[in-house]
Amino acid sequence: MSDAPLWSIFVNACLINNFVLAYFLGLCPFLGVSGKLATATRMGGAVTFVMLVSSICAFGIQQLLVAIDAPYLRLISFIAVIASTVQLVEMFIKKTSPALFRALGIFLPLITTNCAILGLALFQTNKGFDFAQCLAYALGAGAGFTLALVLIAGLREKLELATVPDVVRGTALSLVLAGLLSIAFMGFAGLGG
Amino acid sequence: MTGPLHGTPALGDEFVKGLWRDNPVFVQVLGMCPALAVSNTARNALAMGLATSFVLILSNAVISSLRHVIPKQVRIATYILVIATFVTVVDYAIQAVSLDLHKALGAFISLIVVNCLILGRAEAFASKHGIGRSLLDGLGMGAGFTVALFSLGAVREILGSGTLFGIQVFHADFQPWIVMILPSGGFFTLAAWLLVFNAVTARRARAAEPLEAPR
């Protein structure tokens, strides 16, 4: 059992051990959707929402699996719940905002395979968080993901205007940017943890 | 090389394309999370590559054989269940073989489930092709992924710790580049490999150009 205060869990997940820049979780949407600032913000919102919901579900499932003593079902049940949550969110967005649905494209179904979401569920279980701590962790991770996505989208919009050699354009440049951001985020290590 | 003209490439090509032309990491940029997270040593990278290949090949085969049975609406969820089953198998197998390795890879073994590469191949290939081709595709993609992971891990270990598979490579005076084994080193190494890939591809395209459009 962990007895870390909620605020420190939030800061830890958001800044110090940022899911994207320290754990490399959720890189596919990070590189794919981060071309435009507006899309990045919405994607961040979608991921944060799915994280919250699946964190709550994962907490419930873990209690259940401990009760029936079947830890080997953990991975399968986590992923099944997350996949169905994503399909729900997908249907909801398709209905309410077709433009957003088109903008997110293939990346919305791929939230299912977003490592950040399953990673969150697994880490919170491994750390033995209670319910409130799980919520703080999910919110922090979502905020951190959105922050990283928005930062890199802003940088990439500026880069559109720069003249760089053809070979460097595209993913390679984004990766170098991500590396630099990752170094910058290491500065947060002093915040505690 | 000379496949039939009606759009089905030669069997060998299904295997070879994963190694270079459609390399999952360097060209399609899929499956990056494990590629970067566990590639701080060559050994971890190799183990991760093999584990992923195992899951990829088996899930490709199962999904391909079930492709007429699975309803279209719930296909993604079904694929993921199949993949999760094999990942659980691998997770327990690694734990039984080497507890050390299991600790080093940590949650990232479980995270093979959400490797975009595996679901991507299931959706884009195994759900549309026969078992034989899907097996070959899985083999090729798995091999490409393992090679890519190994080349990342080797570079990071040699520069970041001055060793390869734990064996000293440089003279004892070598000052390791700590940044290479930190998260940011993963980004930089992958960026460097992508540059090499892009440069080679661009060069080949230039070499091929005059044949089609002489100037």
Image (cartoon, coloured by chain):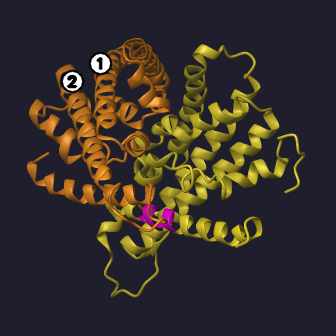
Residue where numbered disc 1 is placed? A56
Is B190 magenta? The answer is: yes
Whether labels 2 and 1 share one chain: yes
Question: Can you give x and y, in whole percent of width and height, for residue A38 in the image?
Answer: 29, 35
Quarter placement of the N terminus of chain B:
bottom right
Which residue is identified by label 2? A135
Q: Is residue B136 among the parts visible in the rendering?
A: yes
Residue at left offset 45%, top offset 67%: B192
Which region shows up in magenta? B189-195
Q: Are the residues tagged 2 and 1 within 8 Å (C-beta)?
A: yes
Residue closest to the eye, A137 or A163: A163
Q: Amino acid at mark 2?
A: Leu
Chain B: give its colour: yellow
Residue B48: % across, % down: 53, 50
Residue A94 — which label?
none
Secondary structure that dominates the magenta span: helix
